[in-house]
Amino acid sequence: MLEGYRGSALQSLLQINADIGDLIEIEKNSNIYKGILMPSYSPYDDIIVIKLDNGYNIGVSIISAKIKLIKKKSESQKETQEVSKSTKSEIKIISTGGTIVSKIEYETGAVRPALSTEDIIKFMPEINNIAKISAEILFAILSENMTPEHWVKIAEAVKRAFKEGNEGVVIAHGTDTMAYTASALAFSLKLPGPVVLVGSQRSSDRPSSDAAINLYSSVLLAKKAPFGEVVINMHGESSDTYTLAHRGVKVRKMHTSRRDAFQSINDKPLAKVEWKENKVEILRSDYIPKRDEVEEDAKFDTHVFLLKYYPGLTPDILEYLMEKKVRGVILEGTGLGHVATSFVDYIKKMTKDGVFVGMTSQCLFGRVNMNVYTTGRLLQEAGVVPLEDMLPEVAIVKLMWVLAHESDQEKVKKLMLTNLVGEINPRHSLDFFPRWNYD
């Protein structure tokens, strides 16, 4: 079925008996373009979309062009696609929304969610040669609309996927809040295989899209990786050579638009995926091993607050939070873990009333140390708990999860300081901190 094609483009493809997934060649203006025929979302009748060997999708006008069929989609690929629908799958793709399952609405220029997860698979038919695939649309939302209630549904869907016999799970997710969801799943699940969150910085039908490569390498990772933990897998460099799998509780989106926006913070990636060679290179041996059975315990208390300190912020904000009955506050302090000393008495009152207050750093790299300066010691005496090298967003998600399971303040403190899934790194290496080469 020639999805999305019409007019002269459709007629040209019908004349050569081409179908989605076939290898075709287009000769135009002395240039030859060879690639796999892809679905079209173009509003123009003369555009044919193909995937080049380098993974990019391009659209070529067939006006004054010659088009020919080079190779039909292989029989084994057809069988794989048919089997994946009729037999038990090995890898489950769960779609939650985001750019990776979005396409351009050419009339307005906006990006809107695609209707089906299978749309993504069509952008890289080779994905079916890695494993038997099944897909589920859990919901179709942009990541800024993700909530803890959605995290619970995703965790339950992951549990079902493993109970169905899948070896790994890939979750298509928007990039902006993907690290929050990864943390929530990491604390909520004990896993018999990898759970790989994947997104894209550019939608699937843009020529520079990273969607197909990210998705392909994520399925490969879910199939081959030996660990049983939650990771985020995205481009490892600006070109298309490899992707990197980052531990879900030690990763952050560090750029608004670069394809290699995600970086491990105070940590190293778990794996490198060289997708052209179908190779997964495990970079560390301290990964969480696979368990025999999946366990899910997704509960979150949203009566928490992440407070970023800045010069001029007044401590009466804490009185407002107490009126709102928050049970926990994560401070994103300066440097080694500081806020103004005017906060000390307010914090003392909060902690005496049973509110947990934890300290992280705006610096991201490094760890808090509240024993160096007087302010840090005063804050600790008021009840602030230094949270080592935990990222602020990881700390707030962990606090939601902990408060949903414990009410005793000492037990909450103990759990927040316990390294549950690698969110605290007791040792730092000099090469954790990125250095830019300006030569």
Image (cartoon, rainbow, N blue to C red):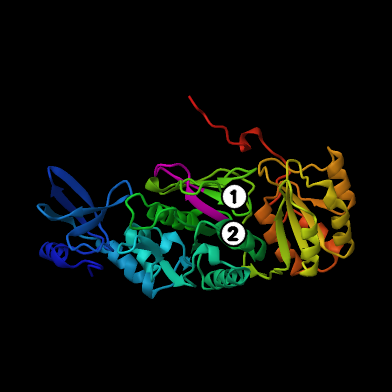
Q: Is residue 236 magenta?
A: yes
Residue 422, visible in the rendered structure: no
Q: Is residue 398 left or right of residue 252?
A: right
Q: Nearer the viewer, residue 312 or 394?
A: 312
Do tag 1 and tag 2 residues touch (Cβ < 8 Å)?
yes
Q: Circle 2 — which element?
A: helix
Query: Start and end of the magenta stretch?
Result: 228-244
Q: Name the spot of residue 341 as percent of width and height, x first.
A: 84, 47
**Residue at the (12%, 44%) spot, across then down:** 29
**Residue at the (64%, 70%) spot, across then down:** 296
Crowd rating for badge 1 (residues with CA inside 10 Å; few <14, some 14–19, many 20+): many
- Report the residue marked by disc 2: 182
Quarter of the rendering containing residue 395 = bottom right
Q: Name the spot of residue 191 as percent of width and height, x first.
A: 61, 63
Q: Nearer the viewer, residue 340 or 408?
A: 340
Amino acid carrying label 2: it is Ala
- Report the residue marked by disc 1: 251
First in sequence, mark 1 or 2: give its number.
2
